[in-house]
Image (cartoon, grey):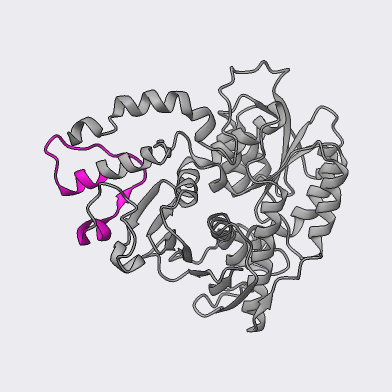
Amino acid sequence: MEKDQDVTRREFLKTAATAAAVSALPAVGAPAIIASPSPSDAVGYGIIGTGTEGCTLLKFLTTIPEGRCLATCDIYPPNLKKGVETIGSNPQTYDEYHRLLDRKDIDSVLIATPLNLHAQMVVDALAAGKHVFVEKTMFFKEEEEKQIRDAAAAHPHQVLQIGLQRRSSVLYNVAMEMIRKGALGKITFVRANWHRNSDWRRPVPDPKFERLINWRMYREYSGGLMAELASHQIDVANWAIGAEPVSVIGTGGIDYWKDGRETCDNVQVIFEYPGGQKLVFTSILSNAHYGFQEQIMGDHGTLEITIGKGMYFREKVAKATGGAKENWWAGATVSDEATQKGIPIFPERVSSDEGFMDREMRLGRRWLASMGIYEYEEPHDPWWSELKNYFASIRENKPVAAPLEIGVADARGVIYGNRAVDTGQKVFWPKKQA
């Protein structure tokens, strides 16, 4: 009977309990379950940059006992004060980051400063013998890649992790496992959008602090929408396709917010990959209807994913393969309604009075299990998970969630994407040395 073949919640939990350690996050290395360390065992860290992003990290760090905040650094006194209040302990404060790096009791440094400062701070922190977590984008200018590579090569035993939190998301890892096991067939296209209806500005108490607080608006410090938003989605596309782009074209401008900013308030770019796949990214600051998400499309199906939500849509086999191939989703009915409404990646409660979509979701769960892809609730916010992974890499030699090469590929996409927008010309990736 069909009921006997179903993967029940109890069976799932039993299987997942034995398989989770090896199948949940195979490419990342999920953080192990560790008893709360004593203060002497915790990683002593300092954080450079306690603005909005830095304080977001500190908020999650308050719940991670494997790290202990010893120092904070920011050149803007209100930010410095806010950082101390957020972490809720009594760190030493600095307004010059080299003084923080000079401390021998600090093992690790987290960098959450404006983008133009990232590369030099990474190099200096590695030279000072620190493990480094740096927010995306890893570097600002093309020539900074070599500086970071050289510093990382000179300090191979130090962890360098880039803040691309989707790499630590269970949802995104399950989605990538589905892709690797054929759920989408051949990937041909990725569409990504990050739309907002706001000026992206932050309030400034004194005009002299305009460029300090709204640094994202100025090209001296920022890569604009490409660096702050597209970077996440370029990384998702690279991950799904399994390659870096080879070229990019784009357009954009300051067409809505005429307020003195220097970075675009809208960009539209198309990246091309070695197998002919395309990534189309759009970002606007005048309409938030579509929010932010990635749509990964193949000839067998589509994944729509964003933080906290993932949906799988099947292609009709007749359309995908001309009817010549056997239905790769064994036992499932290919129907217009299922194709249009999609099936959640993560489990949802199924009613006792099973209707059409309940049945489709149950079949979807069965298929995931039959493919060795186990369902997981997102146990923690991905920001928390990436920091947990970072400390596990330091303390237990776990694989780094977003290491150097991922950060390099992501930064290139941002830099070349901006260059295509600025010049109106097609920009090509450098040819790799033989």
- Residue 123 picture location, percent across and down: 83, 49
- Residue 386 picture location, percent across and down: 59, 39
Q: Is residue 39 above or below residue 336?
A: above
* Residue 212 quadrant: bottom right
Q: Quadrant of the N terminus?
A: top left
Q: Which residues are magenta?
A: 335-361
Is residue 103 inside the magenta stretch? Answer: no
Q: Which residue is the extreme one toward the bottom?
A: 424
Query: What's the residue at 64%, 46% (across, down)?
Result: 402
- Which of 150/431 is in front? 431
* Residue 395 quadrant: top right
Does residue 71 appear in this view?
no
Q: Is residue 325 above or below residue 351?
A: below
Q: Is residue 429 above or below residue 31?
A: below
- Which of 209/336 is in front? 336
Q: Is residue 418 above or below residue 83?
A: below
- Which of 48/179 is in front? 179
Query: What's the residue at 20%, 59% (across, down)?
Result: 337
